[in-house]
Amino acid sequence: MIYLDNNAISIITFIQNCIGRIDDLVVVARPSLRRGDLRTARAVGRAQVVLLSSHFERYLYTVNEEAVAFLNTKRLASSVLPNSLKLLHSRYPIDDLCETGWENRSQKLATFVAEDGWLWESDRHGTLSHERLLAWLTAPKPADLRRYYRYWNIDDIFTRITRRRSARGQLWLGVQELVDIRNSIAHGDFAAQPTQRDIQRYLGSARTFCERPDKVLARALARLTAGGPPW
């Protein structure tokens, strides 16, 4: 179970909603295609890519929020958390401290001790900030997706959710192509003209990724808490 706009919905419902909105744009494009209005049809295709990419990225942020919220309710000792996760969480205030003149660091140092000090004492409890765990992400590229799940002690999420190397390669390529063409569109590259066949391929990759990793993450969280999975 994940949450969007404060409403609990299943992963499948989330994907169906995403597909429905993209299909709505296909309906809009069909009359243009019949009239031979390729300009409108291409504009709709570009809009579909932007919409799909936005939903895909939102999915990752939502899963992250739910994972952190679940851990915060468990009030785990810091020693249970992966070191890589603790380092990432503390990175940004430490970087900020390093960029601040020594004579002006007292307030920021006090804030760091109050908000992150617990992470570095084994018998302490505290609250994680979900924003910190994805502050580095600029786009959900496959390498960055793999990096994110590694913070939860999941070595290679693409290997965990696919059985065959060929399927793994197709999934990786599909996600990368979606991110690349989204970036091209955002930067005004008019040569980026995805076809409906392209969009269905991107949608298949996004659907596959949204359906599978949350189960792997749920099991990882269950191991951390020595209890049941959160969803």
Image (cartoon, rainbow, N blue to C red):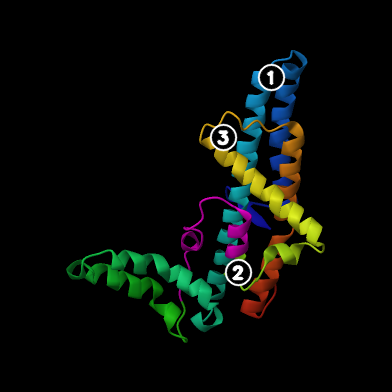
Name the residue carrying label 2: 150
Q: In this rendering, is residue 7 above or below 168?
A: above
Proximity of marks 1 and 2: CB atoms separated by less than 8 Å: no
Proximity of marks 3 and 1: CB atoms separated by less than 8 Å: no
**Which structural element holds mark 2?**
helix
- Total label count? 3
Q: In this rendering, is residue 201 above or below 143?
A: above
One can see residue 218 in this view: yes
Structural distance between the alpha carbons of marks 1 and 2: 43 Å
**Residue 20 marker:** none
Name the residue carrying label 1: 38
Name the residue carrying label 3: 185
**Which structural element holds mark 3?**
helix
Amino acid type of the residue tagged 3 in the rendering: Ile
Structural distance between the alpha carbons of marks 2 and 3: 30 Å
Q: Please report whichever mark, 3 or 1, sits nearer to the chain's N-terminal start.
A: 1
Amino acid type of the residue tagged 2 in the rendering: Arg
Going by the image, does 154 lie left or right of 104?
right
Query: Image quadrant of residue 166?
Result: bottom right
Q: Please report whichever mark, 2 or 3, sits nearer to the chain's N-terminal start.
A: 2
Structural distance between the alpha carbons of marks 3 and 1: 17 Å
Foreground of the two, 103 or 128 = 103
Q: Please report whichever mark, 1 or 2, sits nearer to the chain's N-terminal start.
A: 1
Callout in the foreground (1, 2): 1
Q: Does the magenta stretch include residue 26?
A: no
Q: Position of residue 229 (x, y in %)?
A: 69, 70
